[in-house]
Image (cartoon, rainbow, N blue to C red):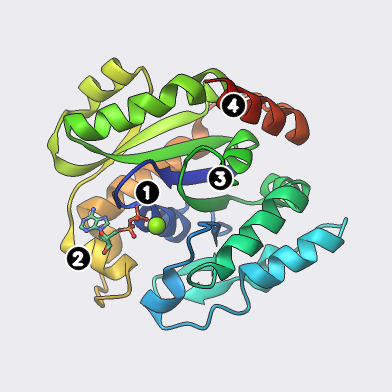
Amino acid sequence: MLIIVCSVKNAPGATTLGLGLAALWPENNAVLLECDPEGGDLAARFGHHPQPGLTGLAAVARTEDAQVDLGEHAQELGVGARVVLAPPGDAAAAAVQTLTYSGIEVLRRAADEQAVILDIGRLARGKPGIRLAAVADHVLIVAGAQLSDALQVQARLEWLRPELSGRLWLVRSGDNGYGSAELSRELKVPVLGEMPTSRLVAGALAGRLQVPNWRRLKLARAMRDMAITLTTAQPASILPPDTAAERLVAVEARS
Ligand SMILES: Nc1ncnc2c1ncn2[C@@H]1O[C@H](COP(=O)(O)OP(=O)(O)O)[C@@H](O)[C@H]1O
Ligand SMILES: [Mg+2]
Protein backbone atom coordinates (compact mmCIF):
# COMPACT_ATOMS: atom_id res chain seq x y z
CA MET A 1 0.00 0.00 0.00
CA LEU A 2 1.34 3.43 -0.96
CA ILE A 3 0.38 6.24 1.41
CA ILE A 4 1.16 9.93 1.00
CA VAL A 5 1.35 12.23 4.01
CA CYS A 6 1.41 15.94 3.27
CA SER A 7 0.31 19.41 4.34
CA VAL A 8 -0.80 22.46 2.38
CA LYS A 9 0.49 25.21 4.67
CA ASN A 10 2.29 25.78 7.98
CA ALA A 11 3.69 22.80 9.88
CA PRO A 12 0.63 20.91 11.13
CA GLY A 13 2.44 17.63 11.83
CA ALA A 14 2.79 15.75 8.54
CA THR A 15 6.25 14.41 9.37
CA THR A 16 5.09 13.50 12.87
CA LEU A 17 2.16 11.56 11.42
CA GLY A 18 4.30 9.81 8.81
CA LEU A 19 6.72 8.61 11.45
CA GLY A 20 3.91 7.68 13.82
CA LEU A 21 2.18 5.58 11.15
CA ALA A 22 5.45 3.83 10.28
CA ALA A 23 6.13 3.04 13.95
CA LEU A 24 2.56 1.96 14.75
CA TRP A 25 1.59 0.13 11.53
CA PRO A 26 -0.27 -3.07 12.43
CA GLU A 27 2.00 -5.33 10.42
CA ASN A 28 5.67 -4.94 11.11
CA ASN A 29 6.54 -4.08 7.53
CA ALA A 30 6.03 -0.35 7.08
CA VAL A 31 8.72 1.98 5.82
CA LEU A 32 8.65 5.78 5.72
CA LEU A 33 10.39 7.64 2.89
CA GLU A 34 11.28 11.28 3.45
CA CYS A 35 10.29 12.70 0.06
CA ASP A 36 10.02 16.37 1.01
CA PRO A 37 12.02 18.28 -1.63
CA GLU A 38 12.74 20.94 0.97
CA GLY A 39 14.78 18.39 2.85
CA GLY A 40 14.49 15.81 5.55
CA ASP A 41 14.14 16.56 9.24
CA LEU A 42 14.42 13.14 10.81
CA ALA A 43 18.17 12.52 10.50
CA ALA A 44 18.87 15.69 12.46
CA ARG A 45 16.03 15.11 14.93
CA PHE A 46 17.27 11.60 15.75
CA GLY A 47 21.00 12.22 15.40
CA HIS A 48 21.43 9.88 12.41
CA HIS A 49 23.56 10.34 9.30
CA PRO A 50 21.28 10.71 6.25
CA GLN A 51 23.08 7.87 4.49
CA PRO A 52 22.12 5.20 3.69
CA GLY A 53 18.99 6.98 2.59
CA LEU A 54 16.98 8.58 -0.17
CA THR A 55 19.93 9.65 -2.30
CA GLY A 56 21.14 6.06 -2.63
CA LEU A 57 17.63 4.73 -3.19
CA ALA A 58 16.99 7.26 -5.96
CA ALA A 59 20.22 6.25 -7.73
CA VAL A 60 19.28 2.56 -7.59
CA ALA A 61 15.64 3.15 -8.56
CA ARG A 62 16.77 5.01 -11.66
CA THR A 63 18.89 2.20 -12.98
CA GLU A 64 17.25 -0.96 -11.66
CA ASP A 65 14.24 -2.51 -13.27
CA ALA A 66 14.04 -5.26 -10.72
CA GLN A 67 12.50 -5.23 -7.26
CA VAL A 68 14.37 -2.80 -5.03
CA ASP A 69 14.62 -3.64 -1.34
CA LEU A 70 13.66 -0.40 0.42
CA GLY A 71 14.96 -1.92 3.65
CA GLU A 72 18.52 -1.66 2.34
CA HIS A 73 18.17 2.13 2.25
CA ALA A 74 16.27 2.50 5.51
CA GLN A 75 17.56 3.14 9.00
CA GLU A 76 15.79 2.09 12.18
CA LEU A 77 15.02 5.07 14.40
CA GLY A 78 14.75 4.89 18.17
CA VAL A 79 10.94 5.02 18.10
CA GLY A 80 10.87 1.71 16.24
CA ALA A 81 10.25 2.88 12.68
CA ARG A 82 12.22 2.18 9.54
CA VAL A 83 12.90 5.35 7.58
CA VAL A 84 14.62 6.16 4.31
CA LEU A 85 16.18 9.43 5.42
CA ALA A 86 16.63 12.47 3.20
CA PRO A 87 19.49 14.92 3.47
CA PRO A 88 18.58 18.39 4.72
CA GLY A 89 18.14 21.30 2.32
CA ASP A 90 18.34 21.35 -1.45
CA ALA A 91 20.17 18.04 -1.78
CA ALA A 92 16.88 16.30 -1.06
CA ALA A 93 15.17 17.91 -4.04
CA ALA A 94 17.39 16.12 -6.55
CA ALA A 95 16.73 12.72 -4.97
CA VAL A 96 12.98 13.34 -4.82
CA GLN A 97 12.99 14.50 -8.44
CA THR A 98 14.83 11.36 -9.59
CA LEU A 99 12.56 9.08 -7.60
CA THR A 100 9.46 10.82 -8.94
CA TYR A 101 10.39 10.76 -12.59
CA SER A 102 12.32 7.47 -12.76
CA GLY A 103 11.38 5.48 -9.70
CA ILE A 104 7.59 5.42 -9.55
CA GLU A 105 7.36 1.85 -10.85
CA VAL A 106 9.86 0.77 -8.21
CA LEU A 107 7.83 2.45 -5.47
CA ARG A 108 4.58 0.93 -6.70
CA ARG A 109 6.12 -2.55 -6.82
CA ALA A 110 7.50 -2.19 -3.30
CA ALA A 111 4.09 -0.97 -2.15
CA ASP A 112 2.50 -4.19 -3.38
CA GLU A 113 4.49 -6.04 -0.71
CA GLN A 114 4.52 -3.64 2.22
CA ALA A 115 3.21 -0.33 3.55
CA VAL A 116 5.25 2.44 1.94
CA ILE A 117 4.59 5.84 3.49
CA LEU A 118 5.85 8.91 1.64
CA ASP A 119 6.21 12.22 3.49
CA ILE A 120 6.13 14.69 0.60
CA GLY A 121 5.98 17.86 2.70
CA ARG A 122 3.75 20.49 1.09
CA LEU A 123 1.40 19.42 -1.64
CA ALA A 124 1.70 22.32 -4.07
CA ARG A 125 1.39 23.06 -7.75
CA GLY A 126 4.41 22.15 -9.80
CA LYS A 127 6.06 20.06 -7.07
CA PRO A 128 7.02 16.44 -7.67
CA GLY A 129 4.70 15.33 -4.87
CA ILE A 130 1.74 15.75 -7.23
CA ARG A 131 3.02 12.88 -9.33
CA LEU A 132 3.55 10.72 -6.27
CA ALA A 133 0.03 11.51 -5.04
CA ALA A 134 -1.36 10.47 -8.41
CA VAL A 135 -0.19 6.87 -7.93
CA ALA A 136 -0.86 6.53 -4.19
CA ASP A 137 -3.55 4.35 -2.66
CA HIS A 138 -4.24 6.97 0.00
CA VAL A 139 -3.38 10.68 0.26
CA LEU A 140 -3.53 12.17 3.77
CA ILE A 141 -3.62 15.95 4.08
CA VAL A 142 -2.76 17.05 7.60
CA ALA A 143 -4.26 20.44 8.46
CA GLY A 144 -5.29 22.52 11.41
CA ALA A 145 -9.01 23.07 11.96
CA GLN A 146 -9.27 26.84 12.10
CA LEU A 147 -11.25 28.61 9.37
CA SER A 148 -8.02 29.78 7.73
CA ASP A 149 -6.69 26.20 7.60
CA ALA A 150 -9.92 24.86 6.14
CA LEU A 151 -9.95 27.54 3.45
CA GLN A 152 -6.38 26.68 2.48
CA VAL A 153 -7.36 23.05 2.04
CA GLN A 154 -10.55 23.93 0.19
CA ALA A 155 -8.65 26.04 -2.33
CA ARG A 156 -6.56 22.99 -3.31
CA LEU A 157 -9.45 20.54 -3.29
CA GLU A 158 -10.90 22.04 -6.46
CA TRP A 159 -8.15 20.45 -8.50
CA LEU A 160 -7.24 17.56 -6.23
CA ARG A 161 -10.67 16.09 -5.64
CA PRO A 162 -11.61 15.06 -9.18
CA GLU A 163 -8.51 12.91 -9.59
CA LEU A 164 -7.99 11.74 -6.01
CA SER A 165 -11.57 11.12 -5.06
CA GLY A 166 -11.89 7.94 -3.00
CA ARG A 167 -8.31 8.05 -1.80
CA LEU A 168 -8.14 11.53 -0.28
CA TRP A 169 -8.36 11.97 3.49
CA LEU A 170 -8.00 14.84 5.93
CA VAL A 171 -6.23 14.50 9.24
CA ARG A 172 -7.33 17.19 11.67
CA SER A 173 -4.50 18.54 13.79
CA GLY A 174 -4.58 20.70 16.91
CA ASP A 175 -7.14 21.20 19.62
CA ASN A 176 -9.14 24.19 18.38
CA GLY A 177 -11.42 25.04 15.50
CA TYR A 178 -13.93 22.95 13.59
CA GLY A 179 -14.73 19.43 14.70
CA SER A 180 -14.04 16.51 12.38
CA ALA A 181 -17.69 16.05 11.42
CA GLU A 182 -18.02 19.72 10.45
CA LEU A 183 -14.77 19.65 8.51
CA SER A 184 -15.68 16.60 6.53
CA ARG A 185 -19.16 17.96 5.81
CA GLU A 186 -17.92 21.37 4.68
CA LEU A 187 -14.96 20.14 2.65
CA LYS A 188 -16.62 16.93 1.45
CA VAL A 189 -13.54 14.88 2.29
CA PRO A 190 -13.54 12.18 4.97
CA VAL A 191 -11.55 12.88 8.11
CA LEU A 192 -9.30 9.89 8.79
CA GLY A 193 -8.51 10.92 12.35
CA GLU A 194 -7.36 13.61 14.71
CA MET A 195 -3.96 14.60 16.04
CA PRO A 196 -4.52 16.31 19.38
CA THR A 197 -1.66 18.33 20.83
CA SER A 198 0.67 16.06 22.77
CA ARG A 199 3.98 17.30 24.05
CA LEU A 200 5.04 13.78 24.95
CA VAL A 201 4.11 11.85 21.81
CA ALA A 202 5.21 14.64 19.44
CA GLY A 203 8.39 14.95 21.50
CA ALA A 204 9.09 11.22 21.20
CA LEU A 205 8.42 11.30 17.45
CA ALA A 206 10.74 14.29 17.03
CA GLY A 207 13.59 12.70 18.97
CA ARG A 208 13.31 15.39 21.67
CA LEU A 209 12.05 13.22 24.49
CA GLN A 210 12.51 9.66 25.68
CA VAL A 211 8.98 8.52 26.49
CA PRO A 212 8.97 4.74 27.03
CA ASN A 213 5.17 4.43 27.01
CA TRP A 214 4.46 6.86 24.16
CA ARG A 215 2.61 4.17 22.19
CA ARG A 216 -0.09 4.03 24.86
CA LEU A 217 -0.82 7.77 24.89
CA LYS A 218 -3.81 9.36 23.18
CA LEU A 219 -2.08 10.79 20.08
CA ALA A 220 -0.30 7.48 19.42
CA ARG A 221 -3.55 5.54 19.80
CA ALA A 222 -5.20 7.94 17.34
CA MET A 223 -2.43 7.34 14.79
CA ARG A 224 -2.65 3.60 15.28
CA ASP A 225 -6.41 3.76 14.63
CA MET A 226 -5.72 5.69 11.42
CA ALA A 227 -3.29 2.98 10.31
CA ILE A 228 -5.91 0.30 11.00
CA THR A 229 -8.56 2.22 9.04
CA LEU A 230 -6.19 2.46 6.07
CA THR A 231 -5.40 -1.24 6.10
CA THR A 232 -9.09 -2.08 6.06
CA ALA A 233 -10.25 0.66 3.65
CA GLN A 234 -11.57 -0.43 0.30
CA PRO A 235 -8.77 0.13 -2.20
CA ALA A 236 -9.62 2.82 -4.75
CA SER A 237 -8.80 2.05 -8.34
CA ILE A 238 -5.62 3.63 -9.60
CA LEU A 239 -4.78 4.19 -13.21
CA PRO A 240 -1.45 2.98 -14.56
CA PRO A 241 1.24 5.29 -13.07
CA ASP A 242 2.00 7.32 -16.21
CA THR A 243 -1.65 7.95 -17.05
CA ALA A 244 -2.51 8.87 -13.46
CA ALA A 245 0.36 11.34 -13.16
CA GLU A 246 -0.28 12.93 -16.55
CA ARG A 247 -3.96 13.39 -15.75
CA LEU A 248 -3.34 15.02 -12.40
CA VAL A 249 -0.69 17.33 -13.84
CA ALA A 250 -3.09 18.27 -16.64
CA VAL A 251 -5.88 19.06 -14.17
CA GLU A 252 -3.43 21.08 -12.09
CA ALA A 253 -2.42 23.12 -15.15
CA ARG A 254 -6.03 23.78 -16.21
CA SER A 255 -7.37 24.99 -12.88
N1 LIG B 1 0.13 16.77 17.81
C1 LIG B 1 1.21 17.49 18.13
N2 LIG B 1 1.36 17.96 19.40
C2 LIG B 1 2.43 18.70 19.76
N3 LIG B 1 3.43 19.04 18.91
C3 LIG B 1 3.35 18.59 17.64
C4 LIG B 1 2.24 17.80 17.18
N4 LIG B 1 2.45 17.50 15.87
C5 LIG B 1 3.62 18.07 15.53
N5 LIG B 1 4.17 18.73 16.57
C6 LIG B 1 5.44 19.47 16.60
O1 LIG B 1 5.33 20.52 15.64
C7 LIG B 1 6.56 20.66 14.93
C8 LIG B 1 6.30 20.48 13.44
O2 LIG B 1 5.87 19.14 13.22
P1 LIG B 1 6.18 18.37 11.86
O3 LIG B 1 5.60 17.02 12.00
O4 LIG B 1 7.62 18.49 11.53
O5 LIG B 1 5.31 19.25 10.85
P2 LIG B 1 5.26 19.26 9.25
O6 LIG B 1 5.94 18.03 8.76
O7 LIG B 1 3.81 19.34 8.92
O8 LIG B 1 6.01 20.50 8.86
C9 LIG B 1 7.52 19.61 15.51
O9 LIG B 1 8.31 20.24 16.49
C10 LIG B 1 6.58 18.59 16.12
O10 LIG B 1 7.19 17.89 17.22
MG1 LIG C 1 7.58 17.84 7.48
| C-alpha span from label 1 to label 2 | 16 Å
Q: Residue at x 75, y 28 (%)?
A: 243
The residue under label 4 is 253
Q: Is residue 7 left or right of residue 109?
A: left
Q: Are marks 4 and 1 in contact (CB under 8 Å)?
A: no
Q: Is residue 68 above or below residue 75?
A: above
Q: Where residue 51 appears, x then y in whole percent?
A: 60, 79
Q: Residues within 10 Å of mark 3 (few under 14, many from 20)?
A: some
Q: Quadrant of ligand 1?
A: bottom left
First along the sequence among labels 1 and 3: 3
First along the sequence among labels 3 and 2: 3
| C-alpha span from label 3 to label 4 | 12 Å
Does the closest atom of ligand 1 sit within 8 Å of the Cβ of label 2? no
Give amino acid for label 1.
Arg
The quarter of the image holding the N terminus is top right
Q: Residues within 10 Å of mark 1 (few under 14, many from 20)?
A: many
Q: Are marks 3 and 2 in contact (CB under 8 Å)?
A: no
Q: Is residue 77 left or right of residue 103?
A: left
Q: Residues within 10 Å of mark 2 (few under 14, many from 20)?
A: some
First along the sequence among labels 1 and 2: 2
Q: Nearer the viewer, mark 1 or mark 3?
A: 3
Give amino acid for label 2.
Leu
Q: Nearer the viewer, mark 4 or mark 2?
A: 4
The residue under label 1 is 224
Q: Residues within 10 Å of mark 4 (few under 14, many from 20)?
A: few
Q: Label for residue 127? A: 3
First along the sequence among labels 3 and 4: 3
Q: Is residue 148 left or right of residue 25?
A: left
The residue under label 2 is 200
